[in-house]
Amino acid sequence: MFRLSENQRKKNINYLISENLLLKVKIVRKIIWLRILKNIFIKMIIVDSSILVAAFRKDEIHHQTALRTCQSADQILVIDYVLAETLTVLKMRESIYIMQKCHDFLFDSEGIIFDRLSDEEVKMSTDFFYSHQKNLSFVDCALVIYKKCRNLPLATFDKYLQKVLS
């Protein structure tokens, strides 16, 4: 039977480890390129509740613009805070029927992605909320942090939020 010397065994093991690492690096590079290409070819936006509310309130001044904004994106990111705020506003200002219609649309549509802030992003949002002017809600501060961390466009009709983003 053929036996490898200790040195040869170590060389073979090191070769296999380096090949394995090289393969992992190649896979990571492919994943990074796929993410870059996805962001180039797929229009993804984060939406504020002002967009969603306007889309479901026909008498809203920005109704048509909100619909066009939502239709122009391939994927719409809705964070949990925005979902809660949107459904609450629609229930209070419109009706349970309109709120339910919005809820069903959001949960039944393929292009809608729900996400939440990480623990670190929540902490950053809280710090930003404490230190910022009184015209921004906590949800607005969370959207600013989420947008900056994800480097994605944010659609909103909120003038104060737009001002902070510019």
Image: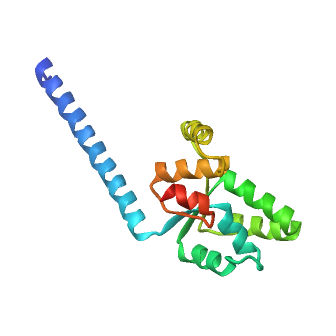
Viewer-side residue, 77 vs 137 = 137
- Which quadrant of the figure has residue 1? top left
Residue 118 horizontal side relative to residue 4, left or right: right
Residue 143 image point, x, y percent: 58, 52
Residue found at the far right of this picture: 96
Residue found at the far top of this picture: 6
> Which residue is rendered at x = 33% and y = 48% of the image?
28
Residue 30 horizontal side relative to residue 78, left or right: left
Viewer-side residue, 106 vs 133 = 133
Determine if residue 2 is in view. no
Viewer-side residue, 89 vs 114 = 89
> Which residue is rendered at x = 72% and y = 68% of the image?
53
> Which residue is rendered at x = 23% and y = 42% of the image?
22
Residue 139 image point, x, y percent: 66, 50
User: In this rendering, is residue 71 above or below 124?
Assistant: below
How many marks overall? 0
User: In this rendering, is residue 158 above or below 63?
Assistant: above
Residue 27 image point, x, y percent: 32, 49
Determine if residue 90 is in view. yes
Viewer-side residue, 69 vs 141 = 141
